[in-house]
Image (tube, rainbow, N blue to C red):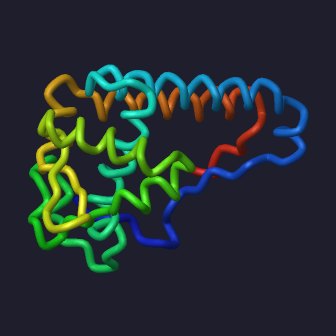
Amino acid sequence: MSEPQESSRLRLELDAPGFLKVERLVAYEMGNLLLMLNLQLQQRFGLRAEEYQVYLLIVLATVQRFANISDVNTENLSRAPLPPDLAGSISRRRIADVLGIPFETVRRTVASLLDRGLIEERSRGCLSTRGGTLQYLGEDATPEKLARRFISSINTMIRIGAIKPPDKL
């Protein structure tokens, strides 16, 4: 799979006047999208809302180091677990800071996630997923379902005039 050249990339743009005319519908569409995406993932992992937020932050922290590499190796773009040297981590303290929840709540939630085998502590204070999260989600095509919902929402915003479609498709 080759990446398109920078000059040939099609870009969507916000139509500011169009957006203002339909802002309430756009806000509803975005809110509904976020709620549905989060509920689907929360239910897939069998987590309560607060547990899900902590877990999602750990998932994103695990992938962040890899995602920020400028020369990404395409062999690591699939569902296969990231090699440990490319996986990032996050501390309990940072989770509490990012989510704005008490450290003790994070400590208890992390203990529960560790007990259930959803995450691991690679070294003292370095929390990450165990690997295979994307494979697990792919078993029932969850990532594709989420992407389709996202695209549907974008198409709705194009249809109601909040987003300018690209000149060429």
Please identify the quarter of the rendering in which residue 41 is found.
top left
Q: Nearer the viewer, residue 93 or 130?
A: 93
Residue beneath the point at 84% across and 48% down = 16
Q: Dividing the image into 4 quarters, which one contains the N terminus? A: bottom left
Residue at figure coordinates x 59%, y 56% from the top left = 11
Quarter of the figure with residue 37: top left
Vertical side of 62 occupied by 149: above or below: above
Task: Classify residue 112 as left or right of residue 95.
Answer: left
Residue 24, percent from left and from top:
82, 26
Name the residue rendered at 26%, 66% in the picture.
88
Pick out the residue farthest to the bottom: 71
Q: Nearer the viewer, residue 117 or 167?
A: 117
In the depicted structure, whether residue 74 falls above or below residue 40: below
Instruction: Tell me where residue 109 appears, x and y as whole percent.
Output: 33, 39
Which is more toward the observer, 135 or 122? 122
Counting from the top left corner in percent of width and height, residue 7 is at 52, 72
Tell me: 23 left or right of 59. Answer: right
- In this view, the residue farthest toward the front is 104
Q: Nearer the viewer, residue 87 or 48?
A: 48
Q: Residue at x 10, y 66 (%)?
A: 84
Q: How many marks?
A: 0
| Above or below: residue 102 compared with residue 32 | below
Picture coordinates of residue 142, whole percent (x, y): 28, 28
Q: Measured along the vertical axis of the image, is residue 140 above or below residue 52? A: above
